[in-house]
Image (cartoon, rainbow, N blue to C red):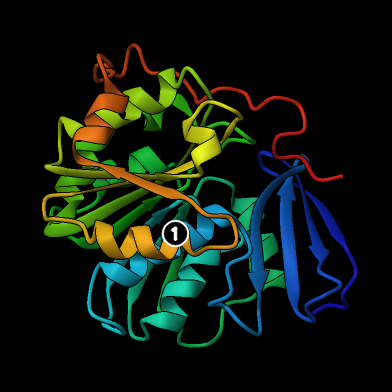
């Protein structure tokens, strides 16, 4: 492990910076072109600093009995926050991480190495291409956290992408995605419409202020063919330091409204965040 001083490096898709947290001895923040990407505490991989990461963690805790190993496919790697979380909370899990930025993977492996025997395999590849080549029914959980800078690329926002995710997941598998949008939620509604066309059950986790259109922010999409434990998710997200709401059922259908699924030819990236929305000074 290197000294706790900032590390800056040009990677394939921008300039990455690792900054130590002065309050936690072996904790680091990863930014790319100034946009926060990941936070990792090497001494406590179950610690999740970012609100959206905690919401992903709450879902992961409910998808199977406590401690049961899972086969997890991560599209988007960053500093490997969620793979570390799964390895810590569900030892013996088999995980594949697909990250398009090979330089970023190398930076993270060098300065924030995974523990021996973590069960995490790293792959430098395009998320959509990897998904299309993956075997049917090969994952218990698929987590999509794919960002090019501060935007989600268009080729992972279409109905065809949702269909590939459904194919790769086992019948009782669960899809999770970190999305970002603001009112009038054209992008977020289209994403929900895509997955509503493919999966039987949907839930959306976000701060009330974001859902009311007061500001730009993250929202976690959850999709599956089996009922989701929305009661437990609602309790845990409401008790968070930054409380969130779980929308599902009729309320979520009302939110989707008249939005329609998006095909590949019409797919667009997520909107550009307003200045300062996610930046780090």
User: Can the viewer see residue 87?
Assistant: yes
Q: Position of residue 262 (x, y in %)?
A: 29, 18
Q: Position of residue 145 (x, y in %)?
A: 47, 47
- Say what secondary structure mark 1 lies in: helix
Instruction: Compare residues 248 and 34 and report the one nearer the observer.
Output: 248
- Residue 35 is left or right of residue 238, and the answer is right
User: Disc 1 marks which residue?
Assistant: 237
Q: Position of residue 114 (x, y in %)?
A: 57, 77
Quarter of the C terminus within the rendering: top right
Please give the name of the residue rendered at 73% of the width and 50% of the height, measured from the top-left corner.
31
**As drawn, 215 above or below 84:** above
- Residue 273 is left or right of residue 265, and the answer is right
Please give the name of the residue rendered at 51% of the width and 73% of the height, measured from the top-left corner.
84
Please give the name of the residue rendered at 50% of the width and 26% of the height, measured from the top-left corner.
270
The crowd level at tag 1 (other Cα within 10 Å; few <14, some 14-19, many 20+) is: many
Q: Quadrant of residue 185?
A: top left
- Residue 86 is left or right of residue 48, and the answer is left
Quarter of the N terminus within the rendering: bottom right
Q: Position of residue 133 (x, y in %)?
A: 25, 46
Instruction: Compare residues 168 and 91 and report the one nearer the observer.
Output: 91
């Amino acid at each position: 492990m290197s000294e706790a001083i900032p590390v800056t490096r040009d990677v394939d898709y921008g300039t990455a910076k690792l900054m130590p947290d002065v309050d936690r001895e072996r904790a680091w923040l990863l930014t790319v072109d100034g946009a926060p990407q990941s936070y990792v505490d090497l001494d406590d991989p179950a610690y999740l600093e970012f609100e959206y990461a905690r919401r992903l963690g709450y879902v992961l805790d409910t998808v199977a009995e406590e401690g049961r190993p899972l086969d997890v496919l991560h599209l988007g790697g960053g500093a490997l926050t969620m793979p570390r979380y799964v390895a810590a909370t569900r030892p013996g899990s088999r995980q594949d991480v697909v990250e398009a930025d090979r330089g970023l993977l190398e930076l993270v492996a060098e300065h924030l190495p995974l523990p021996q025997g973590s069960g995490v395999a790293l792959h430098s590849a395009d998320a959509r291409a990897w998904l299309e080549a993956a075997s049917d029914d090969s994952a218990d959980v698929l987590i999509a956290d794919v960002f090019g800078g501060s935007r989600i690329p268009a080729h992972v926002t279409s109905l065809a992408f949702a269909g590939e995710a459904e194919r790769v997941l086992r019948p009782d598998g669960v899809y999770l995605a970190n999305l970002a949008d603001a009112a009038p939620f054209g992008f977020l509604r289209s994403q929900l419409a895509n997955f509503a066309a493919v999966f039987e059950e949907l839930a959306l986790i976000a701060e009330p202020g974001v859902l009311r259109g007061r500001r730009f922010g993250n929202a976690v999409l959850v999709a599956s063919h089996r009922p989701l434990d929305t009661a437990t998710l609602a309790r845990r997200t409401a008790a968070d330091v930054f409380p969130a709401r779980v929308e599902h059922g009729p309320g979520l259908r009302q939110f989707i409204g008249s939005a329609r699924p998006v095909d590949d030819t019409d797919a667009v990236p997520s909107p550009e965040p307003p200045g300062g929305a996610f930046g780090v000074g």
